[in-house]
Image (cartoon, rainbow, N blue to C red):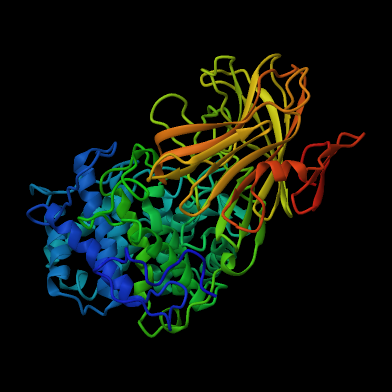
Amino acid sequence: MTAPHVSLTDPTHSSFLPPPDPVRSPVTGWTRAHWEALADRLLDGLLPYASRKLAQYRLPGRPGHAGSWSDGLEGYARSFLLAACRIAGSGGRVPPELIERYAAGLAAGTDPEGAERWPPIADRAQPMVEAASIAIALHETRPWIWDRLDDAVRQRVAAWLGGFVGARANDSNWRLFQVVTEEFLASVGAPHSRAEIDGGLARLEDWYRGDGWYTDGDGRKFDYYNGWALHLYPILWARIAGPRADTSLTEVHRARLRAFLGTHQYFFGSDGAPVHQGRSLTYRYATAAPLWAGALADATPLPPGRTRRLASGALKHFTERGVPDERGLLTLGWYRPFLPVTQRYSGPASPYWASKAFLGLLLPAGHPVWTAPEEPGPVDTADAYLALPAPGWLLHSTAADGIVRLVNHGSDRLPPPPAEAEDSPHYAKFAYSSATAPDTPSDGPTTGPDSHLALLTADGTEVSGRGRIHPLGTEGRRAASWHRAAPPGSDQGHRIETTSVVHGPWEIRVHRVEGPPGAVVREGGWALADDSGPLTEAAGPGWALARREADGLTSAVVALHGWEEPGADGPSHGAVAQARGANAYGEYSATPCLRLTGHPGRPHLLVTLVVLSADPVRPCDPEVLRARDGTRVTAAGAVVVRFPDGTEEEVPAGAGSG
């Protein structure tokens, strides 16, 4: 079956790519040759921005918080990782200038008196991140670069990398940067600390939450770092360590990666798009890195043809949407440049951590991941539901439109209390998907109305955040949590408990909302975005809708219970919030919303149907959906919800998902 929305003859197909191969790759059309061509395009695009001695790549764009000196190193290190995959994957059969280019950069960057010297590795400093990429690249290209360097240059490289020994790394995935860097030093007979290597690997054990899931440091920090860092670096460490590696430990890492990939495969839409959630999203197709890691370590449950389908689908998705740009550069953004998906640490070369996606090139051309016919991904063939108790997530995807939706009742990326419960649009929403992004306005509130239930002041100027999420359970097709809704800067909050139940493209949210008398309550559905112009919108009593005409993608919210205004016979009128320049998926965005203008001042029950769908068969007409509603509250306080196809679920009155 060819996945929806993945065209093998797309007119935007980039001219630098070879023709698609519909026989070997019936889903995406992409082969190893496409990966090599894109790697070459990315490497060639960097050349105009290289420093004279090739130790830095000074790309255009906003500097990262570490400054331009560090940004230049970042450009070298992250692109060296890409070059290493290309060099080693071809057995060194690449244009000699590619090898010479990165060898020359090593010599100039580690010259302590040179004009292009790299910033030193110091406690919790950005060069720690880049050192790991350099160490991995040096290991993978050892016969073609390290072994051919002058001895003086090798000593300088080891001395620069050796800045890690005795240094303090951030207590997060950064501990693994120290692990791989010092293991490389050990492999070349340079000074290192076995205690620091072992300590970093041991710290990883503290963050394991089961079923293949890690949190990135203390707290509930679940996002793509689970795959492109916390699973990836132990696999790469084992490749560097070779016979020095503790085999019992590597088996643990392999088993956890295998478990993770069993669920990670569900995070890609049929068009190849990964679910848009978390930080560092500008790394884009780095989401494919753990897929290749599983194949490299023989630690994957996926058939080889599915591994390639998922990885190629992600790469193709972005390539067909202008990534890289006309200069061959990866910009700070998602498709187009868009700074709200970045963080303070993001510099112009940060997106080149996307190089991790090319680790599959380290596998020989005759490996089954390159030769086996592509197989459809999970979302391509059937509707799927997946409860992930460790991160507190619930996935539901639909084959008819190829969309994956993530319901979030567990990841807020906050350190443990008493750390302040800050709100983040990429963590605090109730839901994320492969077809939408949260609105992230550059002014006003830190988060838009989409996938959020907020308490507002009467004039709408103060909006409560979700902040710290307290999971209450995830099981089957149901997940629950509670949070304290407080305006920005306030330490006073009101408890909101929410249970989500999913079925097909639909999610029903049951909210038990505390709040001050007269407070305004607002709930938003999914934010749709488009570059071509404002989206179609419509609203009526108890419903609102936004639709993208190009593909029929529809976002709707429907009031099922509790949205009636005091003294009114029916629910209040819905509305659509429009924004411009606030969404990574397009210039224009629209979010359907419901609004209750007077909270009664006692715990209040609200039930909402939320829809995101491009399915031409399942209904998205809010008036039809309302007509099929059968929501009722039992004498015991339980809520019985009915989905549009007649399926019923009962949500107990007590907290939790059981």
Q: Is residue 420 above or below residue 266?
A: above
Please tell me which residue lies in front, 304 or 153.
304
Asked whether, in this view, residue 293 is left or right of residue 406, the answer is left
Which sits in the foreground, 61 or 184? 61
Residue visible at 29% across and 72% down in the picture = 36
Please provide percent x and percent y for residue 232.
44, 61
Residue 517, by quadrant, is top right
Pinpoint residue 454: horizontal percent, then vertical percent: 60, 27
- Is there any visible trace of residue 294 in the rendered image? yes
Does residue 84 sit above or below 567 in this rendering? below
Q: Is residue 187 above or below residue 559?
A: below
Picture coordinates of residue 390 (x, y %)?
64, 51
Name which residue lies at 78% across and 37% down: 655
Residue at the far right in the pictured view: 635
Viewer can see residue 179: no
Residue 314 horizontal side relative to residue 596, left or right: left
Residue 43, image x and y in percent? 21, 62
Residue drawn at (30%, 69%) of the image? 85
Name the residue: 25% across, 56% down: 77
